[in-house]
Amino acid sequence: MGKIDLVLLHPPSLYDFRKEPVMYGPISDVVPSTPIFEMYPIGFASLSEYLERNGLRVRIINVALKMLKSKGFDVPKMIQRLRPIAFGLDLHWMAHVQGCLALAEEIKRIHPHIPVILGGFSASYYYEELLRDYPQVDFIIRGDSTEVPLLELIRCLKEEKAISHIPNLTWRDEGGQTHSNPITYVPETLDDITIDYRHIMQKAWRYRDPMGYEPFSNWFMYPVTAVFTCRGCRYNCKTCGGSATTFHRVVNRQRPAFRDPLLLARDILDIRNHLKAPIMIIGDIFQPGDEYGLKLLSALKGKGIKNQVAFEFFVPPSREKLERISEAIPNFNLEISPESHDVTVRKAFGRPYDNSALEEMVENAIDLGCKRIDLFFMTGLPRQTFQSVLDIVNYCRHLLESYGKSRRLIPFISPLAPFLDPGSPVFENPERYGYKLFYRSVEEHRLAMLSPSWKYALNYETKWMTRDEIVYGTYEAGLRLNRLKAEFALIDAKTALATEKRIKDAVSLMRRIDEITHIEDPDRRNREMTELGLHINRLNMSTVCEKRELEWPTHWIRMNPLRVFKTLFMRLQPNIFERE
Ligand code: B12
Ligand code: SF4
């Protein structure tokens, strides 16, 4: 096996999560990951494919997942065995700040001369501070599209050439001085990059390391895949670190870059050929305009796609659009995040529609045979009070009474946690939006991740809700929603009972942690926290709902074995875009 040029490592949110008793709470309940946030950025796949297409050798290792799956997995030993030209770590989600910096430190301890490169949204936001205060970081490549600058950097490191011309790059010179080139590499389309699951399968086979490439725990049992319509967003949701203004400010993107709808259709068909599992289309297909979405749907129509396909919408689509979807994809599913039942809260957050538009969408979708509609509500929003959080559940009752018979409407509730997104409109101007920020710097966030519970990690509270109210309001609403789901047979009695018990246990543990944090003697405080640790670990993976509740139905044979075999043992054609 040739020398590897770049090893991309995905860290856990908290490096020592196997030792430290931390009560993470429901911070990851509505995503496939556990609170370790073991899912690597999907951008790893496009980085790997692009660099390999240009002659470099890249390996992805999901360190977080390996640590999660095996208590004995030895990270230093793994690092010792690797000697690439450079290591790349994602500091994309701020929740990984502690784990990312600790992993980088471990790499530097073992291989002081191998460069460590960071990338991702949070690294792009905090680039100056990261390079100034953390010697374990050598380079940061900023931006939402780093394929080209990363290729250039690895080539220059390999050939020992100067790097100062590389766009989007921040680095430290030999005298310790930090330099930053502006973000000038901002592609206008996504047509030259690809998320190709065949590439991932081939590399997992090349390194005999399926777990290293596994996106999240249990992926082989439930191999949900994603295709991307865009990088960037046209909307400006106030707490979102992926909003139009944040993209502009942090990664110099003036407008979203979209993937050609015909290439997107091809991505979907490629997945259909290999996997019988669900496909999630990330980004509202009508965001770039109706023409884009309709072009995609016509390219998919008549292709016999049997996979469950999930569409996410930022605003409820009309009946006409739903009809086009149902004609193209028989097993279609919808996801939408009204955030709150209260239209004042929803609009203050930045979602421009009322409940009648939402309900009309639900009614039409059910009528047109939609397999499932997921509704996501959130706590910690502008103008949202404790009572307003509880009222979300009353609204869900109204929805289920009206549309619940089909058992296709599934509401979820989760907190805006662990952090308000850096760079989001609220993060930049908290007072203007009624927020109070507890942490701003990298170091404050890093230390926050070591807090004994998610209440203390939470980097904000609002004029309308204290941290306590956000935390206990989320649990109370979760408890009531769980009962409602059981009443409307969305979950079975056993699941409902188990979730109810978990929520109640979580609340009493949170209260116990609150008491322990008030103990003045540090030895006693640590001892009592350690004793609590065992109970905490049991509750940590999901709280207010179960991971299974998020799953779209899937075929019991989830792969197409012949196609997978062919992919593993045949070379991908060099120009993947000219292949039929
Ligand atoms: C799709 C999505 C998801 C998917 C994840 C898909 C995935 N595996 O990447 C799901 C739904 C699972 C998800 C979950 C979460 N998400 Co999310 N997500 C998004 C969304 C909508 C789009 C992301 C996207 O388009 N990526 C584009 C892909 C192709 O690129 P990429 O993966 O970002 O990688 C590129 C660059 O970032 C960079 N890069 C990344 N890593 C590295 C590493 C190196 C070395 C280099 C050089 C470059 C580099 O280069 C890549 C390629 O050019 C954004 C909002 C938005 N408008 O962007 C939020 C967003 C990224 N998510 C966010 C958050 C907070 C989360 C959660 C923490 C929420 C939670 N509490 O559960 C979790 C974390 C899950 C985990 N890691 O386990 C925030 C992040 C804010 C921040 N700075 O921390 C965002 C900005 C907005 C939001 N609030 O939703 N998310
Ligand atoms: S939350 Fe709003 S701003 Fe952020 S990605 Fe979704 S639609 Fe865009």
Image (spheres, grey):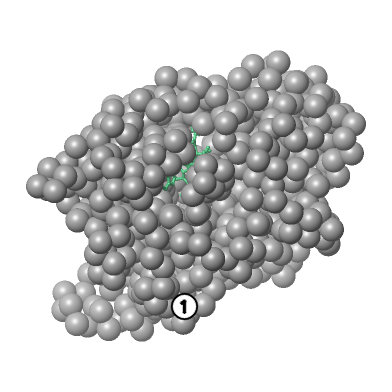
In-front residue for pair 229/4: 4
Number of numbered labels in the structure image: 1
Displayed quadrant of residue 282: top right
Q: Is residue 114 left or right of residue 543?
A: left
Residue 234 position within the rendered picture, expressed as x and y whole percent measured from the top left: 51, 22
Q: Is residue 440 left or right of residue 208?
A: left
Is residue 399 at all visible to an observer of this figure?
Answer: no
In-front residue for pair 516/171: 171
Q: Is residue 178 left or right of residue 89?
A: left
The residue carrying pointer 1 sits among few (fewer than 14), some (14 to 19) or many (20 or more) residues within 10 Å by Cα, namely few
Q: Quadrant of the N terminus?
A: bottom right
Q: Quadrant of the C terminus?
A: top right
Q: Residue at point 90% right, 31% down? A: 302
Displayed quadrant of residue 429: top left
Q: Is residue 301 left or right of residue 433?
A: right
Residue 103 position within the rendered picture, expressed as x and y whole percent measured from the top left: 34, 64
Indicate if the residue with disc 1 has its beta carbon within 8 Å of ligand 1: no
Amino acid residing under circle 1: Phe
